[in-house]
Amino acid sequence: MANSDVFTLGLGLTPPWRVVDQRLETDRQPNELHLAVAADPGARFPCPSCGRLCKPHDWKELSWRHLNFFQHACIIEARVPRTDCPEHGVLRITVPWARPDSGFTLLFEQAALALMREMPVAAAARIIGVTDQRLWRILRFYVGRAIERLDLSGVEAVALDETAAKRGHSYVTVFIDLDAAERPVLFVTPGKGKECMTAFRAFLAEHGGEAGRIA
């Protein structure tokens, strides 16, 4: 089996995508393994809006940081097309190994999130070898997406805790679901008092909850 076929299997790529070349750059630390991924000639791609298979309109060179290959940093490189859909026009497709505009593969982001659950972001950044700002962007994206999907329609019993975040008069108010055995924190906001209650009510309503049902 050729090296490119091994890497294609290792990355879990499926047609039309496959690894076509690889090179190890040893002139930097850590060393970098670059994997060139390409689509089969003549391949058509789904429109990001409707899924209709379309011809590519043009291509753009993109790269993503992947999980390390042994001790080497791994970079995936690919020419990514824009589809020309009769209904939705010219749109950049989403590749199966990364979300749009990320710069990291999905597996890299998954590993980064696992580290950030266990330690400060700065410490995770030192271990992974990227800046903490880039990890914060990953964290904000997935936290934001989780909040968008939050369903608070079943919340009935809530407690709040006004905690001093720093010395002096800097407070943070935490709202907790008293019926939740796991992940009981519902909402966190700077400050204390009436404004925090107003903010929580608005957040509750945005996610299907009803303030009138809460004890």
Image: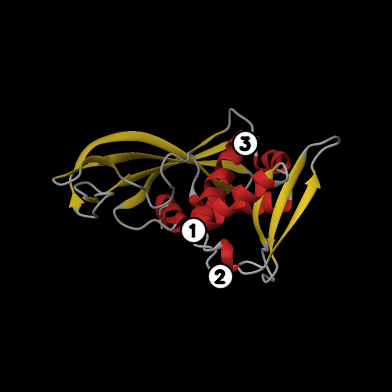
Q: How far apart are the two marked residues, 2 and 1, measured between alpha carbons?
A: 14 Å
Name the amino acid type tagged 3: Val
Name the amino acid type tagged 2: Gly
- Observer-side mark, 3 or 2, equals 2
Instruction: Tell me what residue is drawn at x 54 percent, y 50 percent.
Output: 142
User: What is the quadrant of residue 27 in the picture?
Assistant: top right
- Residue 163 numbered mark, or none: none
> Does residue 108 appear in this view?
no
Q: How far apart are the two marked residues, 3 and 2, measured between alpha carbons?
A: 40 Å
Q: Earlier in the sequence, mark 3 or mark 1?
A: 3
- Indicate whether 165 appears above or below 212: above
- Indicate whether 133 appears above or below 11: above
Split into 4 quadrants, where in the image is the C terminus? Answer: bottom right
Name the amino acid type tagged 1: Arg
Residue 38 horizontal/vertical position (percent): 33, 44
Split into 4 quadrants, where in the image is the N terminus? Answer: bottom left
Closest to the observer: 97 or 185? 185
Q: Earlier in the sequence, mark 3 or mark 2?
A: 3
Numbered disc 3: secondary structure: loop
Numbered disc 1: secondary structure: loop
Q: Which residue is mark 1?
A: 149
Numbered disc 2: secondary structure: loop
Residue 70 horizontal/vertical position (percent): 61, 48
Instruction: Tell me what residue is drawn at x 49 percent, y 47 percent.
Output: 105
Closest to the observer: 133 or 6? 133
Q: Which residue is mark 3?
A: 130
- Indicate whether 180 appears above or below 104: below
- Observer-side mark, 2 or 1, equals 2
Q: Which residue is mark 2?
A: 154
